[in-house]
Amino acid sequence: MSADTLLSTKLHIPAARPEAVGRARLVAALDEGLRLGHRLTLVSAPPGFGKTVLIREWIEAQARPIAWLTLDEGDNDAGRFVRYLIAALAQASDSVRHAAAGLSPPASPQELITVLINSLAATGADQVLVLDDYHTIREFQVHSLLTFILANQPPGLHLVIGTREDPPLPLARMRALEQITEVRERALRFTQTEAASFLNQTMHLGLSAASVALLASRTEGWIAGLQLAGLALRQADAVDEFVAAFAGDDRYIVDYLMAEVLDRIPEKVRLFLRQTSILDCLSAPLCAALTGRDDSQAMLEELEAANLFLVSLDNRREWYRYHVLFAEVLRLTLTAEEQIELHTQAAAWFRDQGSNDLAAQHAHRAARSSAALGPVRRRPAEKQAVVERLSERELEVLRLIAAGFSNQEIAGRLVIAPSTVKRHINNIYGKLQVGSRTQAVAVARSLDIL
């Protein structure tokens, strides 16, 4: 096996962040899983919840040899995946290194995995294998190879997976057999004490206890949300006013979620998220009433498995809610007309269910959106005069941005290069004097350009 074709940095354990907040309670839970002989540790949560940081903190205190592999899209090739897997384990195991050196290049991925398992079993040594960013793996053959490893796992090997969504592995069976330790979003959220340490010691902001409590509550302990709030705070003139007003329309929050989440998901999923974002609580029948889809239950379960900032409110998978900041960003992508229509549909559904209070609540929100729509429509010519006129192509790009399309999707629809899309977007930002996609859409709507 040729090592010179592999990128060595994928095998490096990420460097620790200076003054990082310790997660002693979670490290203890991972230690307990290892003590109980669990085969797998799964750390699964949306982006920005500190999955990699936690895994790194935990393995730092381990006496066992550590094999680390950070996965990417290219690892969907089964042969490449196995080569990297062997290279990672070979760094921590002489037996694997010697076994790998004797393998002939034509060996199939399955044969390589078998040799790998046999060489690990022969030594009987304890070892930890970390597969980070496993959500980048979509190829069934790779999932099948990892399932084979789990089914034939040597006693000394412990597997750790860091991922944004649950992988299609036999997780339910492993739960039933008590072979898995799971750490999810709810556990990864910063407590108020952890939030205070992060904001005041890691980010050196010197916030009051009241400000920390408000930000911790507003972000629901979402670490990336706290960090983005901290970055914005460094530019704020009045700290207390900023903290009081902090919401999902903050440009750092918007840009992060757009780039890390919304731009990466299929159009049908993005549309479902937008249409249901006006709801405080979601159920399949309610979502069906708003979206017209007959697969809303399956979609909700898919969103939950994908960790798309969806929180289950019961154990029967009937009611859910979105993370508050995520929902606020989604609502920013809706036009006033869309909000009126969606709230009206929700009011009708709740009325049919006999929930008159909730029906009245959505009816009030529809009326409020309708009232806000009026002044925007009265003076379009005067408002448009304050910005440089957009070209026809820029208007096309802007309409597609408003519809929730990613840069890559816009390029495909307009048959232009992605770099050209970026140039048009930069021109739009300059003409509208904004710094993000959501701000561009909001300003364009206020000027009656959209």
Image: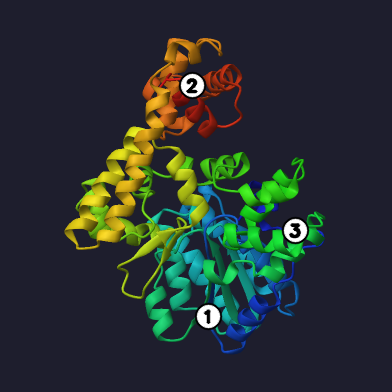
Amino acid, disc 2: Ala
Looking at the image, tell me whether mark 3 or mark 1 is earlier in sequence order: 1
Query: Is residue 104 shown left or right of residue 25?
Result: left
Instruction: Identify the secondary structure beneath mark 3.
Output: helix
Position of residue 62 relative to residue 420, above or below, is: below
Label for residue 39? Answer: 1
Snapshot quadrant of residue 89: bottom right
Q: Quadrant of residue 266?
A: top left
Q: Nearer the viewer, mark 2 or mark 3?
A: 3
Q: Report the Cα–Cα distance between label 3 and label 1.
A: 35 Å
Which label belongs to residue 417?
Answer: 2
The CA distance from mark 2 to mark 3 is: 41 Å
Nearest the eye: 426 or 205 = 205
Q: Which mark is residue 329?
A: none
Q: Give the x, y percent position of residue 61.
A: 75, 76
**Quick check: 343 left or right of 227?**
left
Q: Residues within 10 Å of mark 3 (few under 14, many from 20)?
A: many
